[in-house]
Image (cartoon, rainbow, N blue to C red):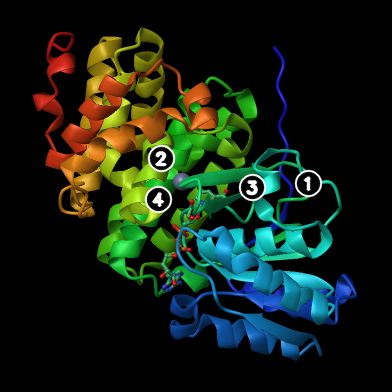
Amino acid sequence: MEFQYGIPSQATFGHGVVKKVGEVLSELEATKVLFVCDEGVKKAGIVDKVQTYMEEKNVAIVPYSNVVPNPPETVLDEGADLAKKEQVEAVVAVGGGSSIDTAKALNILITNPTPINQYDGINNIKNPTKPLIAIPTTSGTGSEVTSITVITDTKQKKKMVIGGRHCGADIALVDPELTMGLPPTITAATGMDALTHGIESYVSNFASVPSDVNGLKAIELISNNIVEAYQNGNNVEARTNMLLGSMLAGYAFNSALLGLVHAIAHPLSVYCGLPHGVANASTLSYAMAFNARDENVQKLYRDIGRSMGVQVDGLSDVDAAYKTLEAIKSLSDQVQIPTLSEAGVKREQFDVLAEATLNEEISIMANPTKVTKEDVLEILDLAYLGSDIQDIKYLQSTVK
Ligand SMILES: NC(=O)c1ccc[n+]([C@@H]2O[C@H](COP(=O)([O-])OP(=O)(O)OC[C@H]3O[C@@H](n4cnc5c(N)ncnc54)[C@H](O)[C@@H]3O)[C@@H](O)[C@H]2O)c1
Ligand SMILES: [Zn+2]
């Protein structure tokens, strides 16, 4: 057995831990910070609160709120110039994955030459970065604990995955209270993204014991709480479990990597503008069903089903996998994940989407089965229609 496992961030989890941000900056002897967020998080009233906690400790703020979803490389140089001109000593990000990833990319460019595109891939960043504190407000990406930033290359039309040394946040303040006001549709999509992280890391070719332990616990927490968090956002326990689950899913996929669902989701965001969570959630059951042709994957799906509380004991591997797939599709339906058609994807785009999926090298490499363009087209078609699991033809030949 051989594996590598590591997490860049020191995480503090709990209700009210965001209040420590000023104290943490004082310990780092940082008196001036670049404060990265987006307009949605500002409107939710979170940014003002975090700013107060920093100002109470006499930290000067350089605000940067030009964050956009699926962050593109085009906004980065201006932010990095601002940070350099102001001579900030640290970076603080509050928001979802888009804000945290933008902050990570800006931090790289403060101490490394622009453009960001030259760092696409793993371990391409040479110079150490400023201390980065990540404060998540969605229970989704796990970016607060991963050594990855995902930035859209608008010219090449692809999502770059920049990772490795000098990329992760040093400190994560993971506070469920900040997720209490997340609207239901964002709760659903980001939560299904986190579930996808747990599932894809568990079946990945690069899975290891530590990624498996975190992945299965993440699946348990998210699958048992996502419907409640969606229907009753004020449920503190459900919100807490969702945020813990998404963080643990980050612990899992940071080393195990992802798979076919994310390989399809990235082009769906780049070419069709789908939010990352919606892109994953709408294709999850169908890409999982495709992978379920493999006997070893069927065994892994039994474990996933068991973590979700599905009754899989005494069933054959294929039947256990099938029951697990049905449970995933049922969760997706209960939180009203749209079909690709409802999300505005056009059939005419399938060809370019399928080509681009196969170019998502890292996720394709980590996926437990080989995939062709025809396979991707078939998955897109099922997700376009929102097909029921029992209508998937290639499962009918195997399942009793
Ligand atoms: N770095 C990683 O490890 C990693 C992993 C997975 C995905 N990602 C990337 O993260 C991005 C997606 O991040 P995301 O899914 O968290 O969404 P997001 O950051 O784009 O946020 C989605 C929306 O939710 C709003 N929002 C966030 N928190 C809120 C709150 N508490 N109350 C009200 N509104 C709130 C935001 O303003 C925004 O409009 C994608 O670019 C994706 O590729 C990164
Ligand atoms: Zn994701």
Q: Nearer the viewer, residue 257 or 115?
A: 115
Asked which quadrant contains residue 369, the reply is: top left
Q: Residue furthest right?
A: 29
Whether residue 24 is situated above or below residue 132 in the rendered picture: below
Q: Which mark is residue 146?
A: 3
Q: Which residue is mark 2?
A: 196
Question: How far apart, in angstroms, are the residues tagged by discs 2 and 1?
Answer: 28 Å
Per the rendering, the mark at residue 270 is 4
Q: Residue furthest front?
A: 155
Residue placed most toward the observer, 253 or 349: 349
Q: Which mark is residue 125?
A: 1
Location of the C terminus by quadrant is: top left
Name the residue rendered at 35%, 63% in the picture.
186
Q: Amino acid at mark 1?
A: Ile
Q: Position of residue 266 (x, y in %)?
A: 42, 44
Give the image location of residue 331, x and y in percent.
25, 45
Disc on res. 117? none
**Image side of residue 160 versus residue 235, left or right:** right
Marked residue nearer the N-terminal end (2 or 3): 3
Q: Earlier in the sequence, mark 1 or mark 3?
A: 1
In the drawing, does residue 3 fall left or right of residue 16?
Answer: right
